[in-house]
Image (cartoon, coloured by chain):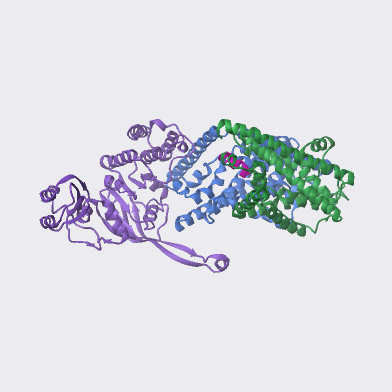
Chain colours: A purple, B blue, C green
Amino acid sequence: MPLIEARGLTKKFRQAVKEPGLVGSLRHFFTRKYRDKLAVDHIDFSVEAGESVAYLGPNGAGKSTTIKMLTGILVPTSGSLIVDGLVPHEKRQQNARNIGVVFGQRTQLWWDIPVVESFNLARDMYEIPVKRYRDNLAQFTEILGLAEFMNLPAAKISLGQRMRADLCMALLHDPKILYLDEPTIGLDIAVKDSIRGFVRSRVEERGTTVILTTHDLGDIEDICKRIVIIDNGRIIHDGDLAALKDTYARDRVIHFQLARPPESTALICAGLPTCETTTDGLRLSVRFDRFKFAAGEIAAAVMPHVEVVDFRIDEPEVEDLIRKVYLGQLNLSTPESAGAPETGELAGA
Amino acid sequence: MAASVASGVRSARRLVYLYFRCLGQQMKAILAYEADFVVLLFSAALVQLTGLLFIWTIFQRIPNINGWTFWQVVMMYALVFVTEGVGSLFFEGTWRLSNLVYTGQFDQMLVRPLSPIVQVLASAVGFNGLGNLVTGFVLIGISITNVPVPWTPGRLLMLAILIASAATIRVAINLGSAATAFWISAPWSMIPMFVHQLGEFAKYPITIYAVAIQAMVVIAIPFAFVSFFPTAWVFGVDAWSLPGLLTPLVAIYTMIMAVAIFRVGLRRYESSGH
Amino acid sequence: MGGIGKYRSMARTSIEIWFTYRTTFVLNMIGSIFYVFAMFYLWQTIFLGSPGALAGFTWPEMKAYLLVSFVLSSLMPWFAEWNMSMDLKEGRIAIDLARPIDFQASRFASAVGPVPFEFGSAVAIGAVVAFVFGGIALPVDGAHAAVFLVSAVLATLIKFGLVYCVSMTAFWTTGTDGITVGRVAVQNLFSGALIPLVFFPDWLRALAAVLPFQGMVSTPALAYLGKMDAPTTALMLGVQAFWAIGLILLGRLAWRGAQRVVTINGG
């Protein structure tokens, strides 16, 4: 029985269409014209307890609309949505007890009161048993390093500190589901790491289900096993992240730095079929499919022909992959089996 | 049956408890910030006192206004301010709603397991309310010593109920007009401010107004039950006493209406996605 | 662009800002209609209940008095003060200090810019109220009207001077909001905005006479109604001028003191 189940979930917005200028305003006053915007278009998905799902899509794709429906803030136009046996918008407060939410741009903390008081208020609101509250608070304080600003009001702490406090507050009541919306935006790398590590440990140790929307692919790689991509209100991919990388992010690139520019690359290319070899002054780059060759093989094929001074390896970027998807250059079909290279089309890569 | 009554009582107690928890935190925070809230207190008192002087000056020249004596008018005036004080001190949050909706911060409240109405009401404190409360109560206290009808414990109890009802009506009007934020998106509360100013009429006996205004202030937005009718009952003015007794009912009715408007607005907010 | 030019553009900017808030302003003005109506009904009841005139005022004269009071009160409303205190709170003063402008003059330019619009709106509302209540008294002749205009200008200067001085206190306190509420209340009473000063008992009249507020409403309103004879008019105009100049000078003094505070404490 999945924890979250959506069937044919749809959200249609009615936008009033108004022409600019005075004439437009007057006309709008008397006769309203509306345009329908289909933000979420009959999507199906289900999430089991303990999964960590990255929910991606270009801006305006329908991500935040979906999240709002999941958290009960928005009423779907049609379709069904069940979260832990409840319909979120009908039983909003009950649903709220099961979830923790971290909005990157806004805080759940009360603004003018000390952070620890926000936690205490949360304890009362969620009716957390005292012992569990104290244990959780102590543990989170240590892991997230909250002690130094516990007594400062939210208004006076830095963004990184606030995000850590928000994360703590979202998890104090041990929710079943944690929604993270851009949780690491604007943060420095040290804070990002500690937040990602903490969330990952919750998934692994406590079995918390995590739904993450983000543009930061480091977040995804660190936290999520599954990736769902939405575009124009429809889900265009839903599957295992590792499998996705195995299927589409297969290329590694070795950059060799040479002592002298090579006279010709013909010999090198001959020794490396299906590889893409380019030169640029003193640099020779070889792009290869990592399932076909090992880095050592590539190096062994190159070094006899040229004098190599230094080299560097670029790993496959999920970022490139996603960018291509957003740009429509990469067309993904629905769930793949791992390591099947010939499905999906690379258009004009 | 008994089980659902018990759980109803429990959730009501929880709401009240959490309300005061949130409000208390706000108060602590504001006290830390506002050093000049003392000035605010005195300013509020000053406003009432100058108003009192105004009324007193008028009554130096004329014996009564439309049959209403000095202390009756003072009481109406004081009731307007006392109820405003209660509103500012305990329920200032209604003025924030427009901004919360406009900036999207309202969503935070929807994700918590607590009624958004309670959260909104508890979200702000206006300490000028304290000045209004104290001064207003002093004025009421003095006024009631000038009442021709002798005071019994029963009458005193009724007075307390009337004041509480009047405050409730005020808060309900604020809440109801604040809820218009769900329909009209604006950075700050324009309509609630507008409705609030209707309260000017409540400072004086409504018998001086044209019928249209009387109708508006009695039926549409019942400011008349905040000051006029309770005063009429307190002073035993036969013609208007009976409606005075209706004040608690009007209070319950306006509160129900305000919560209903809020709920409808909330549903709209949740459907249209702001 | 010398002298006046920069102030003119400040005034223009202020009008633009006011324009973006116009909906709020209009709603506020309409809301203040309730206040005006309440006052009119109150006084109407009072006058109907008493024979002849009250303290030398007939009902048409009283109506005129109330409307003149309303129009004058609508000029440079709390917006100006709020803007000033907001600027101070947000530390924009540092920027202004670096500019080659006279601070007080720039504040005046900002405050005075929207005045024509405020005046227009108030007169429009006043006309509606006057119509509903059956007309008001008008100035006796052109000379009186002219005196009234002079007095009104002086009244506005006094108001600005006072608002400016009060906003200066923000340098020494944590905020002016509280003081403003109190100031408005006291001002309303002693300027004659609520009730003509002649209604006051002697001791209160004496107090009002030494305060600057009466020049803000009472003097121009009485000039409008022609209730002062020539020597009294001259005297009252002189008192107005005295307060206008005095408050403006006081403001300049306060500013010099404030500059010292700012440069020592770093804004």
Q: Residue at x 51, y 51 (%)?
A: B102
Per the image, is B90 magenta? no
Left-right relation of B48 to A224? right
- Residue A287 lies, in percent from the top left, at 19, 54
- Residue B109 lies, in percent from the top left, at 46, 46
Quarter of the image holding residue A268? Answer: bottom left
Left-right relation of C23 to A227? right
- Residue C174 lies, in percent from the top left, at 59, 34
Quarter of the image holding residue A145? Answer: top left
Left-right relation of C194 to A135? right
Q: Quadrant of the C terminus of chain C?
A: top right
Q: Residue at x 81, y 56 (%)?
A: C136
Q: How many marks?
A: 0
- Residue B231 lies, in percent from the top left, at 71, 43
Q: Magenta stretch: dominant SS?
A: helix
Instruction: Write the start and end of the magenta stretch as one range.
Output: C82-93
Name the residue nearer the viewer: A151 or B257.
Answer: A151
* Whether residue C109 is visible: yes
Name the residue nearer the viewer: A272 or C214.
Answer: A272
Per the image, is C86 magenta? yes
